[in-house]
Image (cartoon, rainbow, N blue to C red):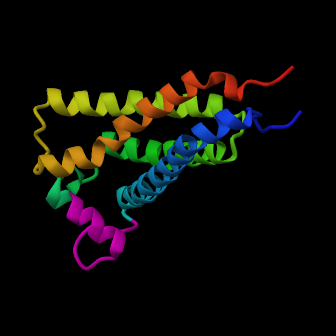
Amino acid sequence: MSGEATVPTSRRSGRRGWFAFLAVYSFILAVITAIPQFYYVLFGLHLVAIGPNTNPLGEVWYWYILSGDNSYQHVDPGILAGAVEDAFLLGPLYFATGLGLARNSRWVYPVGLITGAMILYAIIGFFLGDIFAGLNTVTNGVSYWASNLPYLVYPMLLLATLLVNRKRFTAKV
């Protein structure tokens, strides 16, 4: 039994572009999530600095703080916990989901459902927490929403795609 799903050629060509798009989206989220959040974990451990003239990632974090959310100016236990989750759990799950979608592997169905459900839960909690707090840490609304909406759109697209195309990933007996 192969780990790859088999689908008739006519349906495969129509949906292949969509799966490739989701795979690329997954890889991009893996990179822009895991690396900066790992850096924030290192910052929380006082191993690196965030600020101008530090290093490229430190400068990006500093730019983000000034442009969008000032809650990252100090180490907050809740933000650090979220950074650990993003760096060591969600980042790798984004990568694995992208790999499974790109390879058209059967195992992407459960992994993708887990990834989609986890990020949907996390981002809704993140938004609700910020909204009910009055967005008190947000200094630039455009930067805030532009950097966070992709994390709301992705799980909705991923979950809908996996659920609609469930038969594509089920084993043939």
Q: Residue at x 29, y 43 (%)?
A: 148
x, y percent for residue 29: 45, 50
Q: Residue at x 64, y 41 (%)?
A: 13
User: Residue lying furthest front in this view?
Assistant: 10
Q: Is residue 60 above or below residue 134?
A: below
Q: Nearer the viewer, residue 163 or 42?
A: 163
User: Residue lying furthest top in this view?
Assistant: 173
Q: Residue at x 55, y 45 (%)?
A: 17
Could you tell me which quadrant the N terminus lies in? top right
x, y percent for residue 42: 42, 60
Left or right, 43 with reference to 158:
left
x, y percent for residue 64: 23, 59
Q: Is residue 51 above or below residue 163?
A: below
Q: Is residue 123 above or below residue 163?
A: below
* Residue 61 seen in render: yes
* Residue 76 seen in render: no
User: Residue lying furthest right in this view?
Assistant: 1
Q: How many marks?
A: 0
Q: Residue at x 65, y 33 (%)?
A: 11
Residue 61 located within the stretch drawn in magenta: yes
Could you tell me which quadrant the C terminus lies in? top right
Residue interval drawn in magenta: 47-64
User: Residue lying furthest bottom in this view?
Assistant: 53
x, y percent for residue 107: 70, 34
The picture quadrant where one finds residue 131 is: top left
Q: Nearer the viewer, residue 35 or 84?
A: 35
Q: Nearer the viewer, residue 64 or 14?
A: 14
Residue 71 located within the stretch drawn in magenta: no
Left or right, 56 with reference to 139:
right
